[in-house]
Amino acid sequence: MIESLKVIASFEMDQQCIQHNGEVIDEISFTNASETLKERYKKYKLKYPKFHKMDLLSKAVILGNYFIKKAIPKNSTPLVMLFNESASMQSDLQHIYQYNAYDTASPGIFVYTLPNICIGEVCIKNDWKSPSGFLLFPKEHFEKYLETVAIEMSKNDSEYAFTGFVEVVEDDIFVALSVLQMNKENEGLTAYQFYKKALRK
Amino acid sequence: MNKETLIPQLQNQIVDYLNLEEIQPDEIDPNESLFGDDIGLDSIDALELIVLMQNEYNIQIEDPKEGREILNTVNSMADHIIKMKG
Amino acid sequence: MIKIGAFEIITPLGASLDENWEAIESGKTSLQKVKYNDKAAAYISRFESADFRKLIAMCFEQMLEKIEVDALGKTQVIFSSTKGAVGNWNHYHKHRVYEIQEVLDLNPEWDQAPITVSNACISGLQAVEFAYDGIQFEHWDSAIVVAFDEVSEFIVEGFASLHALSKGVCQPFSKDRDGINIGSAIACAVVSKNPVFKGEQYRIVGASNCNDANHISGPSRTGEGLYRAISNVLKKSAKPDFISLHGTGTPYNDEMEAVALDRLGLTNIPVHSLKPVFGHTLGAAGLLELAICGRMLTEQKAVPSLNYKKQGTSVKLNVQSDFGNLKMNRILKTTSGFGGNNAALLIQRT
């Protein structure tokens, strides 16, 4: 079933560059993830002030969304499923630091100590009342992730899915997002081909 | 402690605590509701302001509902601080 | 027919589903007042000194005894956890959910890539939904679901900063409700189309989840996501005879559920929340509470919603007040969580 999933738009980002639909569109001089994402927010004029309150995972997803969202027709509600290995590690560590250093935790940090909040953020931005889920897998189990995506697309009758791997900590960014379409005729990258290449790095 | 120094101090702290990157501190009208259309804070921001009061001024706000009145404007925050700190 | 069964749970109330059910019959709660820092106390449900990983392994083994392992066929393992047993970690190794996969005796014939759902408080129920969907679309014959979460300073400090903790035992749907309690729990179950169950088993009629697309921590005022999730499930089913709601005891959550039920015309159906019994067990909640729903169907007994005093939702709900006989064929379980998720799942007596 995963053979029927085709990539119709993609976004990849790491410490070196941003790729949109497989082409390098932005070279990065990486210092840290916060700065890099903030610079991109300004460069692409995202105009979404809530961005600045978000955790790194959500910022990365909102940035990727800017590039690939248009592949999904306006009246369509896609399945939204993302995965990574370490869940919300960056926010977790910040939260632990915060309540140890101060008398109280920061509510604005705590709400991001769940990896699925980035899904909430992209659904809010796009008004997608979607079936959704965040899963944890080591990178090498991406096929099982795609299998789960395929099952849920069938179950929900979703023609499109907003999918990907999003792992961001202060000293590293590794993001590979794609819009998948079920049973798209013509040639084009399959989801398997895209993620196999994107996650090999 | 007087309002003249407190208000700009609060404006800076609010921008800092709430990551209001696109707003200059002096753009926050001290008399306008922080929760209105202008600055547009939400419920989590209100809770962060409670943390601000605690961390920066050692003032506890136990009840978020009571908190909304105190935290409604920069002015009301300043008034509360002056009242509590004498 | 796809069924769920072999439920097993371990909570501070008991080391098995049977023990927990007995405690529920006696009206017990696992919540106790605990001082979590200098300033405040909270009612928390936690294991006193046990090694959480050992308890997960124990629950898993006990669950396996309730099935014919040889009859499973092609098997997928699905985990559910929001914090993966954070415990007292102060530096990062690897996510604890992978450690637990190593601790359990996973049969080498089962699929070697377990799925871990980390979707906030709907995770436990959504894990069952994925198990069911995978069988329906013929990817596997059976799925083993293991859900767990543990109380920790991490979680308590976090909810305290949200002013979301109740000063006492939570009071879902009540006028004076003031917040949640946190609890630790482990729950396991098997979902299968094969004849694997030695004991209790229930048909899964339908399952669905939907995002509110409203706010990352506050539920939709119109209960849109929950409304859609329940609507989807009820497309394939007659109305349930009982609804086990999420009922965390916060002003917003409980009101949202009442609004959603009102929109669906379901406010006459008896409801409860199990949060005053176990606390909010986060990634375990959906499966833990579904296990109790299963036992309710077997025993034909309704578990009450503890601590309900006065109507506190804008629409009146039929809040179950006593533990007693109730004829039930179908129970609907719902959960909602941070990130705007909502899930619903309906089980039926076989």
Image (cartoon, rainbow, N blue to C red):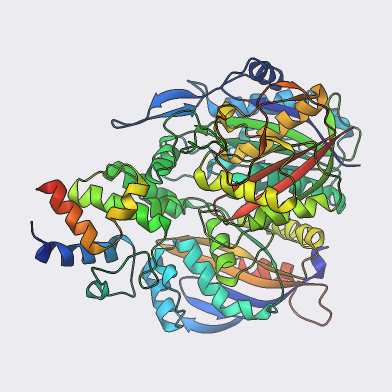
Quadrant housing the N terminus of chain C: top right
* Residue A133 picture quarter: bottom right
Q: C90 or C254, which is in the foreground?
A: C254
Q: Is residue C118 visible?
A: no
Residue at point 31%, 42% (across, down): B62
C29 up-or-down from A48: above or below = above
Tell me residue C126's x, y (percent).
69, 47
State whether residue C295 is above or below residue A25: above
Q: Position of residue C6 (x, y in %)?
A: 78, 29
Q: Is residue C209 above or below residue C187?
A: below
Q: Quadrant of residue C245?
A: top right
Apparent side of residue C176 relative to residue C265 in the rendered image (left or right): left
Quick check: C80 left or right of C138? left
Q: Position of residue C92 (x, y in %)?
A: 44, 46
Decide if residue A199 is in sight here.
yes
Residue C102 spot, x, y in % from top left:
62, 36
> Is residue B77 or residue C18 the one in the foreground?
B77
Q: Is residue C219 above or below residue C316?
A: below
The residue that appears at 81% across and 24% down in the rendered structure is: C300
